[in-house]
Image (cartoon, grey):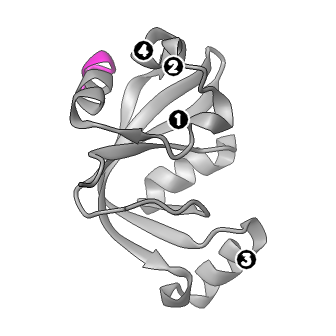
Amino acid sequence: MFPAGYILRIKHKEWVQQVFDSMSYYTSIYRKWATGQIIIFAHKTDKGDSFIGFGIIGTTREFADLSEEEKRLCEQHGWKTAIDLTFMKKFSKPLPVKETFLAETLRRGKFLHGLALDDSQIRELLSQAGE
């Protein structure tokens, strides 16, 4: 059975808008990506690591299926997969990880990246974020 979704971290501030504008996220991690899964996006804010929005997976594309421009970008950063989203929404305000159930775990920063979430965890995070 597939997880309901994952947390993906957007490392650089300038990439946040790019991800939301393009509705695509490039990654080097391998997971059981599936259409309909929910991705919760994390980014470091002035309040620490925070959840900033979410998206729904439409399709994934492996390196061989990317455009030449995308391949060049992926080669620069070591990415191997493009996740194309059918829906994305930024939260009205960031939800600090330390204010969620994940505060009790030892996962912080890069260790949140790729974390699988079940349906109840996703619902809880979206509810806390006001979605």
- Asked whether the viewer can see residue 90, the reply is yes
Is residue 17 or residue 36 the one in the foreground?
36
Label ID, residue 95: none
Q: Residue furthest front?
A: 1
Q: Amino acid at mark 4?
A: Thr
Label ID, residue 100: 4
According to the picture, the residue beneath numbered tag 3 turns out to be 75
- Residue contact at pointers 4 and 2, CB within 8 angstroms: yes
Q: Nearer the viewer, mark 3 or mark 4?
A: 4
Task: Reply above or below: 121 against 110.
Answer: above
Mark 3 secondary-structure assignment:
helix
Which residue is pictured at 38% across the width and 61% down the height? 32
Residue stretch in magenta: 127-131
Label ID, residue 42: 1
Which numbered disc flags the more N-terminal residue, 1 or 4? 1
Neighbourhood count class around disc 3 (C-alpha, 10 Å): few under 14, some 14–19, many 20 upward: few
Which residue is pictured at 62% across the width and 14% down the height? 47
Which numbered disc flags the more N-terminal residue, 3 or 4? 3
- Residue contact at pointers 1 and 2, CB within 8 angstroms: yes
According to the picture, the residue beneath numbered tag 2 turns out to be 97
Task: Reply above or below: 9 against 24.
Answer: above
- Residue contact at pointers 3 and 1, CB within 8 angstroms: no
Coordinates of residue 87 in the picture (x, y in percent)? 27, 53
**Is 71 left, or right, of 84 in this rendering?**
right
How far is the residue under mark 3 from the one under mark 1? 23 Å
